[in-house]
Image: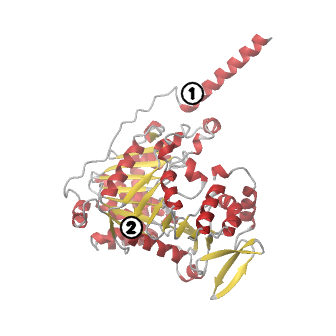
Amino acid sequence: MWSWVALFLVALCGLFLVAVLYVYGWFGRRPRTEPSFALPIGGDETGIDRQLGPLLGAAQPGESVVALISDNIEAFVARALSARRAGRSLDLQYYYWKDDLTGFLLTREIIRAADRGVRVRLLLDDINAGIHDRLCISLDAHPNVDVRLFNPSRARTDRFRRGFEMAIRAFSATRRMHNKLWVADGRLAISGGRNIGDAYFDAAELSNFRDLDVWMAGPVVDQATAMFDLYWNSTSVLPIAALRTPRKQYLPALREALDGLARTAAARFYLERVADAAAAGPGSYWGSRTLHRSADVRMAFDPPEKALMQKRQNWLLRELFPLIKGASRDLRIISPYFIPGAAGTRVLALLAGKGARVAVLTNSLAATDVAAVHGGYVKYRKGLLDGGVELYELKERGDFFDRHRMSLFGARNASLHTKAFVVDGLCGYVGSMNFDPRSASLNTEMGIVFSDEALAAELQSIFDEETAPERSYRLMLKDGRPAWRDRTNGSLRLLRREPDAGILRRLIAGVIRFLPLESQL
């Protein structure tokens, strides 16, 4: 009898192995990924070379030039303009690239750049496996465009394979590339919290993100391109052509659709802003923002092996945490998804207990786009307030937003998406990393670390603007429970429950609070 049981178990294991091989496509052709690297920069070959030459020539050795871009329209223009003026290469790395108005307009810009002979490398996370495959296949059909996916699913269209793959890759499939990087000609780079999509560029109909990018030129761009090459050539990345059958006919159809979109009134608004900037000279790259020159600006990032749970000693949090713990006078944190955990709560309370001002801005329940994450944050709110930490929550809609048109389409609701901190008015960080377990342990993240008083002062000013009573609630303890101090139409009031949040959001946050899911949030 036991021999039959053993035989059955062996057969079952064999079937499981066959299923695994089927899911991963081991019976099909093995993808062969050719390595490629940033193109060498030479003199004044391109428009960007020539326009940035005087700016970089005036810099001291080792000095980078950076600017913070908080305005959403300027953030779109900076990207579109750099693509329009590129003559050598575009290296683009994003968590996701939406197929909406602004996503398609930027797609049109990179196709037009490729038509001029610019080499385009587009690296996307595969968070929405299969959903954007047609766009990726269409772009990849261009001889000057190469599209690759990070930690991709092998099952693109087969629901059975997709479901089985998710079952056997339950943990590895949740490890995503959260990086955001735009590099043009190896000369300038844009990085921060913005993905590519309408909500990041004031084109959404319902709610737009309040976000922050760093525009940069100089040595820090060399670090950014080196990071891009590291990811591009990593074992966690596959070409879209290895996952889906190439379709040459898709590209002409995409061109036609994009040209039609460009003639719409909504598109003209953005294209006219780009045209105006193009006529304004080199300063249009960074919009209306102040330029900062500093030799102490560097790109910090997780290695791509983080997706494989490797090279822990090089993870980004290990570099950032000492900066936070070193605060002696003032620490200001902006994080849309904020789950400090027990250890993080203790550290922040300890700093406050030593006399430092510790202030955190995150989303209110009404403003957040991920109510589940808010449920993870709620359990630490009282402990933070008890420990002397100042908590601010961005309003979904306040006096400021009512007075200012927030979108081309009239959307007045706002959601925080900036990820940044500044320490003692001396140093800080702007990037993709949230203060939550997912960013710490699951996603790959990146950002710019700086030590520069002028840059720190501007970031502090942004924090102060966002935490003004017209834009954010100030939390305080009332009878041992959190309460929200609000200023509306010039009058102060104290709210005793989550402001403006609907029943469904309250329910989601309330349930998540008691589930053992924090490590995934």
Residue at the far front: name it: 354
Provide the residue designation for mark 2: 452
Observer-nearest residue: 406 or 116? 406
**Residue 354 drawn at (x, y percent):** 59, 68
Q: Which mark is residue 21?
A: 1
Tell me the element at label 1: helix
Q: Element at badge 2?
A: loop
Residue 495 against residue 170 in the figure, above or below: below
Q: Extreme bottom residue here? A: 490
Which quadrant of the structure image shows residue 503? bottom right
In this picture, residue 354 sits left or right of residue 42: right
Visible in this render: residue 406? no
Q: Residues within 10 Å of mark 2 (few under 14, many from 20)?
A: some
> Which residue is located at x 54 percent, y 66 percent?
333
Q: From this view, report whether residue 477 is shown above or below residue 337.
A: below
Please tell me which residue is depicted at 38% across the width and 62% down the height of the picture.
79
In the image, what residue occupies the spot 62% across and 27% down? 19
Crowding near the residue tagged with mark 1, few <14, some 14–19, many ≥20 C-alpha atoms within 10 Å: few
Q: Amino acid at mark 2?
A: Asp
Residue 432, disc:
none
Residue 345 picture location, percent across and down:
64, 60
Q: Quadrant of the N terminus?
A: top right
Q: Quadrant of residue 300?
A: bottom left
Q: Amino acid at mark 1?
A: Leu
Q: Is residue 228 above or below residue 10?
A: below
Q: Is residue 502 above or below residue 436?
A: below
